[in-house]
Amino acid sequence: MFAPLIDVLGGRRLCVITGAGISTDSGIPDYRGPDSPPRNPMTYQQFTGDPDFRRHYWARNHLGWRHMDAARPNTGHRALAGLERAGVASAVVTQNVDLLHTKAGSRRVIDLHGTYAQVRCLSCGALISRATLADRLECANPGFAETVAAAQGVEIAPDADAVITSTEHFRMVDCEACGGMLKPDIVYFGESVPKPRVAAAYDVVDEAEALLVAGSSLTVMSGLRFVRHAAKRGIPIAIVNRGATRGDEFATLTVHAGCSEALTALLDASSALPA
């Protein structure tokens, strides 16, 4: 099944772009997979402009981030780390915020949209860990997580979120340094990816001899622009995803399959090559 993928990418140094589809085998849902329920991602304008919406978000995140933190890499993440060790994959540019590539052992990872593990003050720019904020939120809302979990269970949503309904009594906390608004250090819809991060991603695409997209529908421009850039360079582009993507027109090959299986096949093929 994966012979055409190996034929297109074999013997070439790869840059890999990943999306939510690579992490579903780790128990983290995606936004746009064939079996995903309809979701309404939060926008930057909603978060900063509506205190009720922001409180609702932090209540959900207070539960959801723990599940993302506990998630472990799957065989797809481990295969990419193995491809890097083998000198096949030069870098991973990920649209995910789950840190699973880093946990799997990949060393050159560009977290395009940030990660769940840090929180930033929008006033003074101070950064704190999500674990530190969790302690503060627990002090402000003792027993909240346990009460909600016992009453309705916890359904995990993307971006370190959880699906819960009753949040009106949840208390938010502000920056200890300046009293400013705290926000996860994640790029929301309506925000731009920081320019140095974008430039670094373009650099690794320029270094590559082929581009592999794994588990992304490429619906948003933050990932699609690198596929377009690779197409202008004229290098092979392979897309592995369950379902069609916005980048299919640029692809040398599209493979409708799971990332874990496809990436493991690539790693096995690279291991079989003569040294």
Image (cartoon, rainbow, N blue to C red):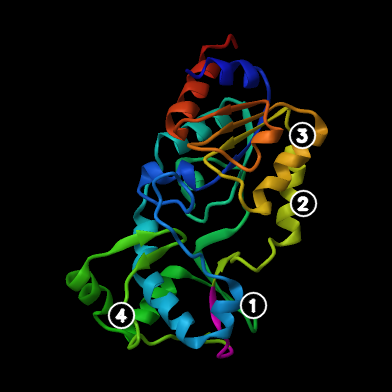
Residue at left offset 75%, top offset 57%: 196
The reply to whether the magenta stretch includes residue 179 is yes
The residue most toward the bottom is: 179
Amino acid tagged 2: Ala
Question: Which residue in the protein does label 1 denote?
Answer: 125
Q: Are marks 2 and 4 in contact (CB under 8 Å)?
A: no
The residue most toward the top is: 274
Amino acid tagged 4: Ser
Q: Are marks 3 and 1 in contact (CB under 8 Å)?
A: no
Q: Are marks 2 and 3 in contact (CB under 8 Å)?
A: no
Residue at left offset 43%, top offset 32%: 260
Mark 4 surroundings within 10 Å by alpha-carbon count, few (fewer than 14), some (14 through 19), many (20 or more): few
Question: Which residue in the protein does label 2 denote?
Answer: 199
Mark 3 surroundings within 10 Å by alpha-carbon count, few (fewer than 14), some (14 through 19), many (20 or more): some
Amino acid tagged 1: Gly
| Residue 166: image tag | 4
Q: Give the secondary structure at mark 1.
A: loop
Q: Nearer the viewer, residue 67 or 226?
A: 226
Tell me how far mark 4 sits from mark 1, CA to CA: 31 Å
Mark 1 surroundings within 10 Å by alpha-carbon count, few (fewer than 14), some (14 through 19), many (20 or more): some
